[in-house]
Amino acid sequence: MRIVDCLSKNLMLLNLGAKNKIDCLMECAETVARNFSDLKKDEIADVLLDREKLGSTGIQDGIAIPHGKFRGLQKTVILFARSLEGIDFQSYDGKPTHLFFVLLAPEETTSEHLKLLARLSRLLKNNELRNELLKAKNEEGITHILEREDDKLA
Amino acid sequence: MTSSLKAALKIRDSAGLHARPAARLVTLAKKFPAEILLRKDSVTVNGKSMLGVLMLGAGPGETIHAEVSGLKAREALAALREFFEAGFP
């Protein structure tokens, strides 16, 4: 499964207003709920925040991959969010997080989830790509960058 | 003259090496000064990088090949073995 197949322009927040982890995940949850009538904002936020309690999904190099499983989802979706200022997401390298790929998966998706995580990681390892994502002016730009890089992966 | 130590590590956890165990693995690896390389198929990554470990996308039953060198290499490899054998405690 490609990253771009899970993205949509309705699920992109290019300028997060949130200044902290909880607000950030609430903002993401709100956007997801607006697009999926089966999911409630508070439930989404609860799942994502519960996962954070087990260890931050703030990885390194300004990237976080918050994730959770949701009943009522037919396929995995990814919300992209960006904070130009950066948010303290308790990342493993201690740096502020700027780029968020929020993975929402259906309940039974262990192997697909692993593959998607691996693919995202391969993509985000690229320093130049991360800079491009920070500079992109709109949703089309983000989609274009990710599509181009996704196509390069086997 | 230092040579590297190698081991094949099998994934026993039923969910594979997903984000939480990856974080624990990296935390463990960072305790040692040794260089820790992990390989699955043709992908080799730094065992001290969370993004690297996630790149492996290693599922249940799969094998990761570890290559450890430098200071405390033996101790680091023993810790990795234990971590995999215990199913990512």
Image (cartoon, coloured by chain):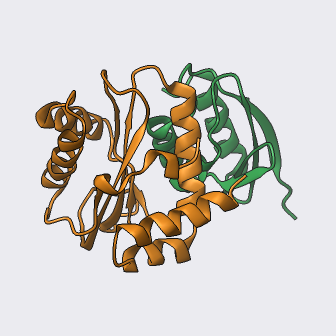
Q: Residue A64 location, x and y as percent?
A: 37, 55
Q: Kindly tell me whether residue B33 is visible in this rendering.
A: no
Q: Residue A110 location, x and y as percent?
A: 51, 26
Q: Which chain is orange?
A: A
Would you say B70 lies left or right of A116 here? right
Vertical arrangement, residue A7 with respect to residue A60, above or below:
above
The structure residue drawn at horizontal position 67% and vertical position 52%, both measured from the top left corner, is B72
The structure residue drawn at horizontal position 30% and vertical position 68%, both measured from the top left corner, is A96
Vertical arrangement, residue A124 with respect to residue B25, above or below:
below
Q: Which quadrant of the figure contains the N terminus of chain A?
A: top right
Quarter of the image for residue B41 reads top right
Q: Residue A132 location, x and y as percent?
A: 47, 77
Nearest the camera: A71 or B4? Answer: A71
Quarter of the image for residue B62 reads top right
Nearest the camera: A93 or A79? Answer: A79
Would you say A79 lies left or right of A131 here? left
The structure residue drawn at horizontal position 16% and vertical position 52%, both measured from the top left corner, is A27
Q: Residue A147 location, x and y as percent?
A: 55, 61
The structure residue drawn at horizontal position 30% and vertical position 22%, both measured from the top left corner, is A72
Would you say A86 lies left or right of A116 here? left
Would you say A87 lies left or right of B28 here? left
Q: Kindly tell me whether residue A80 is visible in this rendering.
A: yes
Q: Which chain is green?
A: B
Quarter of the image for residue A66 reads top left
